[in-house]
Amino acid sequence: MKTSITKVKWRKIEITLKTQPTGSKREMAWFQHLSLSGMGNNPDWVFYHHEGPTESEVMPRLIAEFPDLRDQWEKHLESWEGKSPGSYIDIGLFVRFVVQDLYPSGKTEVVQRAFDLMEDWLKNGHVSVQQLVVIGFLEYLQNLASQQPFGKDAFIPFLGPKSREAWDDLERFWAGKSASERTGNP
């Protein structure tokens, strides 16, 4: 892995971000150096950095963690002329893999790994990844599994605490209960 340097100019401000790997590839540790010029003493500048996974890291991680998904992923990309159609459609492929391939085949340990990964992303992922897990993975899984003989409740035992909370919120939402009905507050 090589050092990358990103320079961005916005108005009179130049931002330089130098990223280089440290340690082994397995550690995936990165050193980042941020240089700013032209900012002056502006106290209104706030920088946010999140260590958790981002949306662009979701599918590569899923393909790496679940090698049996690779053939389906390649066909999926081929049907979209080699480009991803977007994170929500992409993760839908993974949901179909879990609901239509893994679970019916009795691969419950692999299903549990998938749910453990989603739980981790709910706890540690960027907010866009958390939304992707709730809407793209859990909500679609509920819908797709509801059409299967085993039903969506077959997946409840695989849920971690955060996933279960999101699952229940989705259930209440689709049952038509408003936030005030759920909390008792107006």
Image (cartoon, helix red, strand yellow):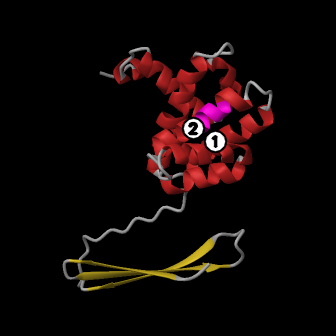
Q: Amino acid at mark 2?
A: Leu
| Residue 21 image offset from top left, x and y in percent | 61, 78
Assess whether residue 95 is covered by the magenta stretch.
Answer: yes
Q: From the viewer's perspective, is 4 left or right of 74?
A: left
Q: Residue at x 76, y 38 (%)?
A: 110
| Residue 121 image offset from top left, x and y in percent | 58, 47
Magenta highlight: main SS: helix
Q: Which residues are magenta?
A: 93-98
Q: Earlier in the sequence, mark 1 or mark 2?
A: 1
Query: How would you rate the neighbour count of disc 2 (Cα within 10 Å): few for under 14, some for 14-19, many for 20 or more?
Result: some
- Viewer-proximal residue, 174 or 102? 102
Residue beneath disc 1? 72
- Viewer-proximal residue, 107 or 178? 107
In the rendered image of this protein, does residue 152 appear above or below residue 101?
above
Q: From the viewer's perspective, is 29 left or right of 181?
A: right
Mark whose residue sits in front, 1 or 2 = 1
Query: How would you rate the neighbour count of disc 1 (Cα within 10 Å): few for under 14, some for 14-19, many for 20 or more?
Result: some
Assess whether residue 145 is covered by the magenta stretch.
Answer: no
Element type where label 2 sits in the image:
helix
